[in-house]
Image (spheres, helix red, strand yellow):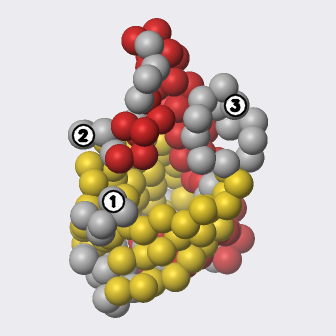
């Protein structure tokens, strides 16, 4: 799943902004920011510890984490100024098949920025949420959760675009 926007800004500036996860609180509806806890910022293999917050009304019927919590993610691809991706980690520090990314494509007037999310094998969190649900509930949750992620990515892009076009 992905969302795309056009931004009037230099590709290197866009990449620098979106790969600085410590600033993700400036654009993310859920991540409040955080800090790099292992490795060099934005480098493959580096670990970011994120502070997150989810309101009670987000997929309110499902047993998802609400309020404040932290999570760790690991940079899995960083090719300046084109692609930046990170994977959510398990509690024991293994990168999961839950990958967020930004792709920066130069255009005549700036860039096309694509924000994407991909999940292969269910994460340990998703397995916990879905455990005990009926097939119908699983389908409803996955539909509702997909809508939430799509909305979050689109809102992030609006905020990123506003910040970068105002700065330039």
Q: Is residue 57 left or right of residue 129?
A: right
Residue 151 shows in the view:
yes
Q: Nearer the viewer, residue 161 or 92?
A: 92
User: Is residue 106 among what the camera can see?
Assistant: no
The mark that comes first in sequence, 1 or 3, is 3
If you read the primary sequence from the N terminus, does the residue marked by circle 3 or circle 2 appear first? 3
User: Where residue 93 appears, x then y in whole percent?
Assistant: 30, 68
* Residue at 25%, 40% in the rendered image: 120
Q: What element carries label 2?
A: loop
Asked which quadrant contains residue 85, the reply is bottom left
Q: In this view, does 64 lie to the left or right of 115?
A: right
Label 2 belongs to which residue? Answer: 121
Q: Is residue 150 above or below residue 143?
A: below
Residue 30 quadrant: bottom right
Q: Where 7 falls versus 152 (above or below)?
A: below
Q: In front of the other: label 1 or label 2? A: 1
Q: Which residue is disc 3 drawn over?
A: 60
Residue at image point 46% right, 20% down? 133
- Pointers 3 and 2 in contact (CB under 8 A)? no
Residue 89, given in percent of the width and then of the height, sits at 34, 62
Label 1 secondary element = loop
* Labelled disc at residue 90: 1
């Amino acid at each position: 799943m992905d969302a795309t926007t056009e931004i009037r800004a230099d590709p290197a500036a866009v990449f620098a902004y979106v790969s600085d996860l410590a600033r993700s609180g400036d654009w993310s509806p859920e991540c409040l920011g955080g800090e790099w806890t292992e490795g060099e910022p934005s480098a493959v293999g580096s670990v970011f510890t994120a502070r997150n917050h989810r309101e009670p009304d987000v997929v309110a019927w499902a047993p998802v984490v609400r309020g404040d919590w932290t999570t760790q993610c690991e940079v899995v691809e960083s090719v300046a100024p084109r692609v930046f991706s990170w994977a959510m980690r398990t509690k024991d520090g293994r990168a999961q098949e839950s990958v967020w990314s930004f792709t920066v494509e130069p255009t005549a007037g700036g860039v096309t920025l694509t924000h994407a999310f991909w999940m292969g094998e269910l994460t340990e969190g998703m397995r916990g949420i879905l455990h005990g649900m009926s097939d119908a509930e699983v389908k409803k949750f996955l539909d509702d959760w997909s809508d939430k992620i799509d909305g979050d990515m689109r809102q992030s892009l609006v905020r990123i675009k506003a910040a970068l076009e105002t700065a330039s």
